[in-house]
Image: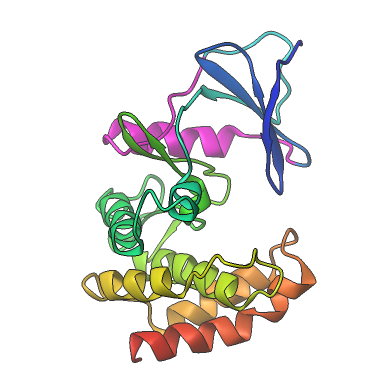
Amino acid sequence: MHTGQLLGSGRTADVYALDSSWVLRRYRDRSDTTEELAVMSYVGAFGFPVPRIGPPVEGARPTDLVLQRLSGPTLAEALLAGRLGEAEAAALLARLLRELHAIPPRVSTDPEDRVLHLDLHPENVMLTAGGAVVIDWSSAGEGPPGLDRAMSALTLARIVLDPAFPAGADVRPLLAAFLAELAEDGGASAADLELARARQQRNPYLTEGERGCLAGAVDLVLDQSGA
């Protein structure tokens, strides 16, 4: 199958242009995308902002996803460019989590469980002309909403402490604003944060430096949230 221009690369996948409407997201080491597609279809049916799923492409691999081609910066890019303030960005992240957690579980029989993204941070939110769209559902699952809030908070705190993060990109104001927003929804408890830390510790795509920041990141979130 012919793929077009490489539009971007992440830790696990590359994104190629197919045409003006669709892109191909190709995972390097995943065997199947069935579950990711199912989650995106499910939350999209509730009106949650996800990329549209494209038609099958001849010659596509099991590790391929055909998705709507989105135009606009990521939330991270908008923050770095000064197009958006930390308070506004934090409110957006919290609102997206809140709206996602209003959706009942797809497979779980526990009525307290909800659909969880488990990797919602500024690089996984695209700011399009039609509004914010959440991308990269490869880590999605189901469980208590507090775990999802903790995962997002821990990721931001880890970036604060990571010496490899670009100089001049101070994430502390965003983290503080985000934790204030989360407090209205129950925040992230110490137990939630420990589950999130263990989950991120097992993530094979984190660098050793990022893993080394996890314990301090938990302490930072607890300190900032007054827990």
Between 154 and 58, the residue placed more toward the observer is: 154
Farthest residue to the left: give it.
Answer: 184
Q: In the rendering, at what x and y percent does residue 211 appear?
A: 70, 75
- Would residue 102 be seen by someone viewing this image from the given angle? yes
Quarter of the image that includes the N terminus: top right
Q: In the rendering, at what x and y percent does residue 6 appear?
A: 71, 26
Identity of the residue drawn at 37% across and 66% down: 144
Q: In the rendering, at what x and y percent does residue 42 appear?
A: 38, 35
Q: In the rendering, at what x and y percent does residue 19 appear?
A: 58, 11
Identity of the residue drawn at 52% across and 75% down: 157
Between 69 and 81, the residue placed more toward the observer is: 81
| Residue 90, placed above or below residue 192 | above
Residue range highlighted in magenta: 30-54
- Would residue 140 be seen by someone viewing this image from the given angle? no
Q: Is residue 35 magenta?
A: yes
Count of numbered badges drawn on the protein: 0
| Residue 47, placed above or below residue 59 | below
Q: Is residue 165 left or right of residue 142?
A: right
Looking at the picture, the colour scheme in use is rainbow
Quarter of the image that includes the C terminus: bottom left
The image quarter in which residue 180 lies: bottom left
